[in-house]
Image (tube, rainbow, N blue to C red):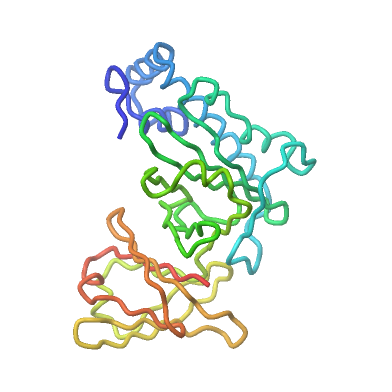
């Protein structure tokens, strides 16, 4: 985590913008002073302020579509009538003038009211990918599919990914001509150890229906099979999320094979994707 002068962190700036009441009055004054004194901290502050302003606007719109599991986006055209106003804010980056944060690429989906932006945080050699969409819930873990590759990155809950430049070349990001985001079609969240169950009940992302998931134990592994409706597309990926860590599994014929010990920690969450 990047530390600014006087121990101000990026997370503290985000909290100051989004949840100021979580900070004491004295701490809010201190953060504000540091933002005013430190040019880099000021850039982060402006970025988060713009980000959550757009998020609030999107939250007012109609919620997720009935059957969207993959959102495909194209590079954003800044003078697009659909994104004039709140969205144009995300395509502009005053920070790039300071050579600290550079907007590498912005993608949008008119159909699904979704915006994605890739930024290069030069002081940390880190690329951040942020998704803004009313198609996702705040605790959704998403799959970001890197264009022209079989590479996927698992997001934090809500749709953020941080990647080292050792894994993604900023210059290559500028050449991306499309971007796909996979939304979980089924989520399992329980406070008990999943390995002790003989079956699971997953919740559909788009309806109030419960999706049964068969469990078959084989030596040190567990096979998980969502039982979908006849017309539902087969699930292709599973993400196991626990304690702020995630693991991605490629499914075979709709079946995910997971080491049993990974399911023995309470609070494990499972996300299935098309």
Residue 267, image x and y in percent? 28, 63
Which of 189 and 133 lies nearest the eye of the viewer?
133
Above or below, 91 against 32 in this view is: below
Residue depicted at x 64% and y 54%: 73
- Residue positioned most to the right: 81
Above or below, 135 against 106 in this view is: below
Residue depicted at x 39% and y 43%: 165
Residue depicted at x 68% and y 52%: 109
Which of 3 and 209 lies nearest the eye of the viewer?
3
Q: Give the quadrant of residue 100.
A: top left
Above or below, 246 against 1 in this view is: below
Residue 25, image x and y in percent? 36, 19
Residue depicted at x 23% and y 77%: 260
Residue 129, image x and y in percent? 49, 45
Residue 63, image x and y in percent? 64, 55
Above or below, 75 against 79 in this view is: below
Instruction: Report the side of 216 relative to 272 (left or right).
Output: left
Which of 78 and 112 lies nearest the eye of the viewer?
78
Q: Quadrant of the N terminus?
A: top left
Total labels: the figure holds 0
């Amino acid at each position: 985590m990047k530390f600014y002068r006087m121990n101000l962190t990026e997370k503290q700036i985000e909290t100051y913008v989004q949840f100021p009441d979580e900070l004491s009055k004295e701490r809010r004054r201190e953060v504000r002073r540091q933002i005013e004194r430190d040019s880099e901290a000021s850039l982060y502050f402006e970025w988060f302020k713009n980000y959550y302003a757009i998020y609030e606007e999107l939250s007012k719109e109609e919620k997720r579509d009935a059957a969207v599991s993959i959102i495909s986006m194209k590079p954003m055209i800044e003078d697009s009538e659909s994104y004039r106003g709140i969205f144009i804010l995300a395509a502009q980056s005053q920070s790039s003038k300071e050579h600290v944060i550079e907007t590498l690429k912005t993608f949008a989906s008119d159909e699904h009211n979704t915006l994605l932006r890739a930024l290069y945080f030069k002081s940390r050699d880190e690329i951040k990918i942020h998704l803004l969409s009313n198609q996702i819930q705040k605790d959704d873990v998403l799959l970001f599919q890197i264009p022209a590759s079989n590479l996927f990155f698992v997001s934090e809950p809500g749709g953020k990914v941080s990647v080292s430049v050792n894994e993604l070349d900023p210059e290559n990001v500028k050449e991306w001509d499309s971007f796909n985001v996979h939304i979980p079609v089924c989520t399992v969240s329980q406070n008990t150890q999943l390995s002790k169950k003989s079956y699971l009940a997953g919740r559909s992302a788009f309806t109030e229906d419960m999706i049964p998931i068969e469990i078959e134990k084989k030596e040190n592994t567990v096979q998980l099979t969502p039982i979908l409706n006849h017309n539902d597309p087969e699930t292709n990926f599973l993400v196991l999320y626990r304690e702020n860590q995630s693991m991605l599994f490629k499914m075979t014929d709709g079946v995910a094979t997971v080491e049993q010990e990974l399911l023995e920690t309470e609070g494990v969450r499972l996300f299935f994707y098309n």
